[in-house]
Amino acid sequence: MTPAMLALERVSKSFLRGTPNEVRALRDVDLAVAAGDFVTVIGSNGAGKSTMIKAVAGFAIPDEGRILLEGRDITRRPPWRRAATIGRIAQDPNESTCAGMTIEENLAMAERRGRPRGLRLAIRGDARRRFRDALAPIGLGLEDRLASRVGLLSGGQRQALALLMATLSGSRLLLLDEHLAALDPKTAETVMRLTDRLIAERRLTALMITHNMQDAIRWGNRLLMMHGGRIVLDVGGAEKAALTVQMLVDKFHAVSHAEMVEDRVLLTA
Amino acid sequence: MVAQLQALGLNMLEQGFLFGFLGLGVLITFRFFRFPDLTAEGSYPLGGAVAAALLVSGVHPVAATLSAALAGAGAGMVTALIHTKLKINNIVAGIVVMTALYSVNLRIMGRANIPLLREPTVFGEAVGWLNGFGLGWRENVYTTILVAFVLLVAAGALLVWFFSTDLGLAVRATGQNEPMILSLGVDTDRTKMVGLALSNAFIAVSGALVAQNHGFADIGMGIGILVTGAAAVLIGEAIFGDRGILTWVVAAVVGVVIYRLLVALALRVGLEPVDLRLVTAALLLMALAVPRFRPRLLR
């Protein structure tokens, strides 16, 4: 049997450990993601979604448990030693691109993902043509603005660029931490379609956190709901396709015992 | 009057170009890494000390200046290691190394001041080399300006090239967006080391050149040097704005020259050398505050 693309084995992570304010962000989380799976992740604030993504990316080291990437234990590897395989986009467009550098410089940095960086000019040979070819299908006109600073772009343009950077060069696992949350609905739709297309085209495995339950149902082939640091719902295939927002809300209420009204507002928004 | 202005202008260019290396070094930490690296206060006199100690023991000025660069790079690496491996705040790491370097510099020099008036310098050597082509020049303020300018252009070109390479982009991104460049597979402990080594190498070269030009190395020559460099970088930026790597490099050098001009003017209008730090502080404050008051159109 081939190992899963990504496996979490009894992963726990607490913040402010040993203080009265201890937060148990992940509690004995077990998860196996097969290559090619596109998993959407929902859950209220503090459910552990972001911590799970950060643990996979290497920005939060678990207190207990193991994380395996294609069968290799990466639990304690620093982020830069996982980057050859993992592409990641955060909610804030400022986090996944470099605002003070140009589009072509950002793409050149992304193109060298996980490979040694030496003293060759970053933009050399036919790099500009390659970048134009990669940017043109996005349809945002970025291919004509290679020398523009990324800070001049809109949030949607920056997230689209971030997507390209995350998928440009050999990454096999894509981590999306509410990458649409800062965008207006129309732009979010455009960027989401691009996300889906890139995942399909490059045959990526993907984990996408979203606050939008409709999106969680509509995209991907597997859905996780997290609550209190645990995975409380895990559905795939036909069962996932048959889900409705109401079913998710009901499931959520079944696992949470407080703040039902507030949560209904939050979850259906 | 004309002669006075001419002397002022020449002095401004001479000192400006010598301190230009300081501007380039401080640019890397202060602008790209966004923190004031106090290692400069130690690596600048370290450059002077290494060059002076080697010159008086008969080493060729070019070799002495290059050794100063290596020593400065080493100092920067120590700061980077303290910051990255011991997880100590970068400003504090700089203060630790700056403090240690004071004693190191005294050890290297063996005393607080080494006169170099009778030693050969890179400026004299360069004139001697040019005279090999039958120019018959004598070393004076003009030849010093020329030599310093050529060295500075070469150094600036080196920086522009470096910051356009794969490694150079990674170093810039480390200062701007560390989580992003980590996510792209860059060991930022290493890029910080490269950046700080490069920065302090330039700063040490500045110390070595100034010592050769002024005719002595002194244990106290580094006091306030970081503020000088930061003021220069900010003055340059206030004039040129923020328009990419080449502009930054040119702005840092122009900033130093203007800073020297303002200092020279301050002395002419009756301020005394003891007031210089006050002038420096005022200039730094102005350079920090002015961009806020610039009209939007100029931005």
Image (tube, rainbow, N blue to C red):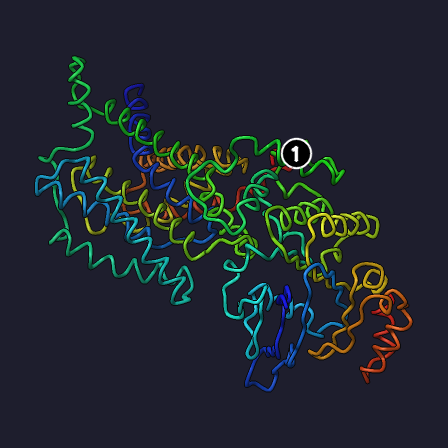
Q: How many discs mark residues in the rendered view? A: 1
> Toward the viewer: A244 or B172?
A244
Residue B168 at least partly seen: yes
Q: Position of residue B64 (x, y in %)?
A: 18, 40
> Toward the viewer: B296 or A193?
A193
On what subunit does the disc labeled 1 rest? A
Identify the residue shown where x is 65% and y is 49%: A162
Q: Position of residue B73 (x, y in %)?
A: 30, 49
> Toward the viewer: A249 or B254?
A249
Amino acid found under the numbered disc labelled 1: Arg
Mark 1 is surrounded, within 10 Å at the Cα level, by few (under 14), some (14 to 19) or many (20 or more) other residues, namely some
Quarter of the figure with residue A235: bottom right
Identify the residue shown where x is 20% and y is 37%: B214
Q: Point out the residue furthest to the front here.
A: A1
Is B220 placed left or right of A121 in the picture? left
Q: Position of residue B278 (x, y in %)?
A: 36, 48
Is B63 placed left or right of B8 in the picture? left
Q: Quadrant of the N terminus of chain A?
A: bottom right
* Image position of A186 with respect to B122: above or below: below
Q: Position of residue B201 (x, y in %)?
A: 31, 45
> Toward the viewer: A243 or A14?
A243
Q: Which residue is mark 1?
A: A132
* Image position of A191 with respect to A220: above or below: above
Q: Quadrant of the C terminus of chain A?
A: bottom right
Question: At numbered mark 1, what does the secondary structure look like: helix, strand or loop?
Answer: helix
Identify the residue shown where x is 66% and y is 77%: A29
Residue B283 at least partly seen: no
